[in-house]
Amino acid sequence: MGNTAGRRAHGDGARAGTAGLALGALGVVFGDIGTSPLYTMQEVFAGPHDVPVDRASIYGVVSLIFWSLIVVVTLKYVLLIMRADNNGEGGIMALVALVQRASTGTRRTMVLSALGVFGASLFYGDGMITPAISVLSAVEGIRVAAPSVEPLVVPIALVIIVGLFGIQRFGTARVGVLFGPVMLVWFALLAAFGVAEIIQHPSIVHALSPWYAAEFFADRHLTAFLALGSVVLAVTGGEALYADMGHFGRPAITRAWLIVALPALLLNYMGQAALLVSTPGAAESPFYLLVPERLRLAMVVMATVATVIASQAVISGAFSVTRQAIQLGYLPRMSVRHTSSREEGQIYVPAVNWMLLVAVVMLVLGFRSSTHLASAYGIAVTATFAINTLLAFYVFRALWRKPLWLTVAGAAFFLVVELAFFGANLTKFLHGGWFPIVMALAVFTLLSTWRRGRAVAADRLSRREMPLRTFIQLLRAQWARDIPGVPVLRVPGTGVYLTAYDGGTPTALARNVEHNHVLHEHVVLFTSRVESVPRVPDDRRLDVTTLNQGIVRVVARYGFQEQPDVPAALRLPEARAAGIDEPRATYFLGHFTLNPVDDVGMAMWRKRLFAAMSKNSFRASTYLGVPSQRVVEIGTQVDI
């Protein structure tokens, strides 16, 4: 009986924990997709596609929205892709790591990895548009609630956006606990206003039948196809379910989606549709006209808060993707600040924050309305959907050995849907759709150039570096007086040489011996490696190998979600057992000046870009957590 009670208590605790995580997920995961009703129906019927506001079109559009939410979000992300986790972590960079783990070095892996990196680049373009369109669409409710203040829409939106980015450096740990409850209220309001209108026109529930979507295409042809470019706005943010899985877990996100978010969204879209059936003129702002007049101003405030929360989730996602890209070797070191001592994922990347702010402000000033911005939205999202599908189903086949026919059929089914969305959005390319593509290409150029440049620089350095065995033999021979030259003196203490490559003699070590003729009694050659997993436990952190002449090689493993900390690694038991005295160690780093030369390896413009990125990267010692007062940098020039 006691065991039964214990199991019941444990089960109640687990359910309470999942419920708490589900509430938290509402505030982080569903902000983007949860604010889509602000502009989706408005863009379909009042946008540039000339979709008539008649019963057949309204039913067809609602049917398309419903089945898009079911197929793209529920079937693909919730039921399938969220199973392709990397030790609990999701997101496109986690998929890239899984692809690389599936088959390292093959041409197919290189192509898919590049595709994944381009998908991550698209995320930045999407991340610029989401705060702009979300905040603008919320503030535009003023036009309905208080038409006299319409000229203030853009200034108010800019103040909110600048304030949002301005507070990032302080973190969101304190106010973040409110995000979930606020979004729960938001979804409750979506459902309530939708139900109130559905009660007036209950026949709208028939629009959930796929027959109306098929009939819409059969009757309207090109108009229906173009409408897909706006219908897809209903599923933007769906990729966040997978990207944020590491924070909340699959069960919590699944429950939050199926129990709260999905029903509320469907009820609101059907409510807007019912309103349009009875009042076609409401197409100019169906979301706010669904709200009783006396509550509209309050709803504008609530919508603004919800869009700020949605924007915060995108900004935090950009910080997280940036850290993953740095760890996986696609970006140079940047300042990454932890804004919470309790939450590892609470980080702030100043460079990304201010670049996003400039881009978002430019978008608001350039497009000036959510309707115009909607033309720029969609291409990046639909391309990301398709890339996620390709990578995930490749992982299903190559890593988890699912049947070939099943993976091909599954990928083909989702790609047909997503490429239809993508094709419809391509028609908006000249009307703003070019922006996220140009931004993504620019980011992809930076990521691919850094990755390739590191490989070229590593090749040049490996040719120059002396094999470590040869270096040790020369030291032994000199101490035995077998070769002439100034003797190398051993001095007390520990010298830690940080090197990215564990095959040769670190340049800083060779230069120190060559010019200063001294060597510490204890020499540590420290290399950090990033594994294709989010985190590495401390008991698997270090590989320690004792070599000759007091030299110890230490290889530290980190996950792509972790921040390297060299002193902490050298204080682990394995390091102390090898005689490493970290508190009194001196750290030596090689400082490389890159000199682009006109030879093979990369185009000259990319070499210059790589050199500029390297020159402006964050100091290695600070990024690796090394105390600056115990650092010695030894410079050398490397031709690339």
Image: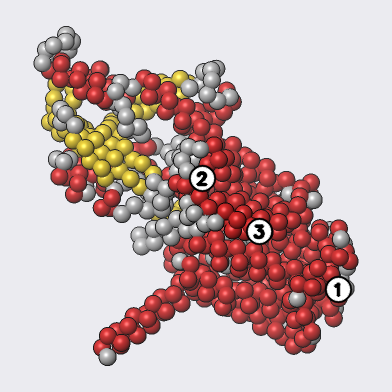
Kindly identify which residue carries mark 2. 351
Question: Cα distance, mark 1 to mark 2?
Answer: 49 Å
Q: x, y (%) of residue 384? A: 62, 52
Q: Secondary structure at mark 3?
A: helix
Q: Which badge, 1 or 2, is on the more N-terminal residue? A: 1
Kindly identify which residue carries mark 3. 414
Q: Residues within 10 Å of mark 3 (few under 14, many from 20)?
A: some
Identify the residue shown where x is 34% and y is 80%.
10
Kindly identify which residue carries mark 1. 56
Q: Nearer the viewer, residue 453 or 369?
A: 453
Which numbered mark, 3 or 2, is in the foreground of this view?
3
- Vertical side of 22 occupied by 346: above or below: above
Q: Which badge, 3 or 2, is on the more N-terminal residue? A: 2
Corner quadrant of residue 49: bottom right
| Count of numbered marks | 3
Q: Amino acid at mark 3?
A: Phe
Q: Secondary structure at mark 2?
A: helix
Q: Amino acid at mark 1?
A: Ala
Identify the residue shown where x is 61% and y is 76%.
187
In-image side of 567 versus 31 (left or right): left
Q: Residues within 10 Å of mark 1 (few under 14, many from 20)?
A: some
Question: Cα distance, mark 3 to mark 1?
Answer: 26 Å
Work out which quarter of the rendered image holds the N terminus and state it: bottom left
> Does the CB distance between marks 3 and 1 fall below 8 Å?
no
Q: Secondary structure at mark 1?
A: helix
> Does the CB distance between marks 3 and 2 fall below 8 Å?
no
Q: Nearer the viewer, residue 216 or 603?
A: 216
Identify the residue shown where x is 47% and y is 71%.
251
Residue 506 visible in the shown view: yes
Q: Which residue is at the far top?
A: 484
